[in-house]
Image (cartoon, coloured by chain):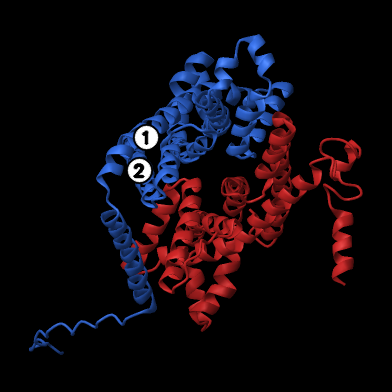
Chain colours: A blue, B red
Amino acid sequence: MTAVTELIPARPAPAAVRAPISVARIAGIVVLALWALLAFGLLMTVINGWDEAKFLRYGPRYLHGLWVTVSLVGLSIVLGALLSIPIAFARMAKNRLLNGIAYCYVYLFRSTPLLAQLFLIYYGLGSFKPQLEAVGLWWFFREAWYCGLFSFVLNTAAYQAEILRGAIESVPRGQHEGAAALGLSRRIAFRKIILPQALIVALRPYGNEIVLMMKGSAVVAIVTVYDLMGETRYAFSRTFDYQTYLWAAIFYLIMVEGLRQVWAVLEKRLTRHLKR
Amino acid sequence: MGGSLSALLDALDPLCGPVGLFRLFGPNSIISCGDTGWGDEIAFGVKVTITLALATVPVGLVLGFLIALAAQSEDRLLRLAAGIYTTIFRGLPELLTLFIVYYGAQILAQSVLASLGFEERIEINAFFAGMVALAVVFSSYSSEVLLSAFRAIPRGQYEAGDALGFRRHKTMRLIVLPQLIRIALPGLTNLWLILLKDTSYVSVVGLADIVRQTGVAARVSKEAFFFYFIACMLYLVLAMISSFGLGFVERWAQRSGVSR
């Protein structure tokens, strides 16, 4: 019989092995240094090129441009959402004709550039001035802002219709059947059972669509709308100061990142019952 | 040799060749391919658009692959650096990125030359600026696609590579990369279609792409609706051709996948 009579005395922990300097670490440091250098360079550009007169002259214009961008995007998202509802239902309809028309609409607007659509509406429809005047719509198509809004609404409606359709079709069949078994009418079942589940699925794509729209809205600057990009181009054409573009970049980054953060919080809040 | 090749390409030109689309409308229409019409100018624009998109993809893919590698590295600093890159270039409008690259490169080149003693005004090539800007945007999006594809590959695949005694880049090349391409293809197809549409922005800095050429035609001929409609249709056809072709590639890539 063996018995342990003596314990091995506690020993100090082995000396920590220092992680060898890997290629990844060097690359990380080099790239971060590059970013820091770039940030420093931009900061120095802003400090060295600081001009009180320019700031007072163009600062308010930038804020106005920011407001134009935000209102344009907000309006086109809301109106596009309204327009997307009938398109999404047409896309899900059993009627071949209705389905085909909605499919063509969505395909057409999703596979052509926003810029070309905007030109088609602003310059293209602008060449039908007499006809439009006869119908009494000329006041609408004369203004670049309205044309921008119109093309954005048509464009985002196509994307949102696909988001909505995908979300509604992602709700399992059993949910429809469950509602039918409870004797709910189709309308109530849709509103109380299908739609809430679909909208949770659609939340993230909707956020992406708003971000895409915000970025895409910069194209209205080309048809002479003074949105954030338009004011930037105006300021650059007057001053030839590279800073103007950097300020626009900062504004756009803050808007997009802010929206992303808000959306993350919203999603966390709305899906808290789905957490396991 | 070169002459016969270009003759063959001319004969097969889908827009202005002998059996081209624009020939259908007769020799004196507004979109015919001679001095009377705008067909050949627009056909040139189509070529520029396709060339730009094709030239952007390899650069953007390689950059995106490197960024995806950095984003899944074990080193915190490298992950941070990659995160900054994707945050910036996914947050900026493509148009703004293009302007920043176009004017930034111009100012940079000018100041470098000025420090060397040359005082000249330089024009940066719009094709080059467009390619860089689009590649940067494409890389930041494709890095996300590739990153999620990397995460879909189980650890066991890497361990199998170790067990076989492969070095790390050999594991990457022979085991991981083929699966990665298969998983990432649908996402990359989407990005290609987005890229094709984004090339329209370079018309703003003066590159003679589809939108630019049709725009010139629209201004001169006063047939704006017709020409911009043609521009939209050309983009539509390009998108249809590429989604058809890429669907073929996707099916080819899936052929040896697990069939469930």
Which residue is depicted at the point 64% across and 12% down? A133
Give the labeled residue for mark 1. A66
| Distance between mark 2 and mark 1 Cα atoms | 8 Å
The chain identifier of the residue carrying mark 1 reads A
Q: Identify whether A43 is placed above or below A197.
A: below
Residue A104 image offset from top left, x and y in percent: 69, 30
For the residue pair B233 and B155, the one nearer the viewer reads as B233
Which residue is depicted at the point 73% across and 24% down? A96
Which sits earlier in the primary sequence, circle 2 or circle 1?
1
Q: Horizontal placement of A3 versus B33: left or right?
A: left
Q: Amino acid at mark 2?
A: Phe
Residue A227 image offset from top left, x and y in percent: 43, 34
As helix, strand or loop, the secondary structure at mark 2 comes to helix
Is residue A184 in view?
Answer: no
Please check whether the numbered discs 2 and 1 fall on a single chain: yes
The quarter in which the N terminus of chain A is drawn is bottom left
The quarter in which the C terminus of chain A is drawn is top left
Q: Amino acid at mark 1?
A: Leu
Q: Are discs 2 and 1 less than 8 Å apart at CB?
A: yes
Q: Identify whether A244 is placed above or below A145.
A: below
Give the labeled residue for mark 2. A251
User: Residue A139 — which label?
Assistant: none
The chain identifier of the residue carrying mark 2 reads A
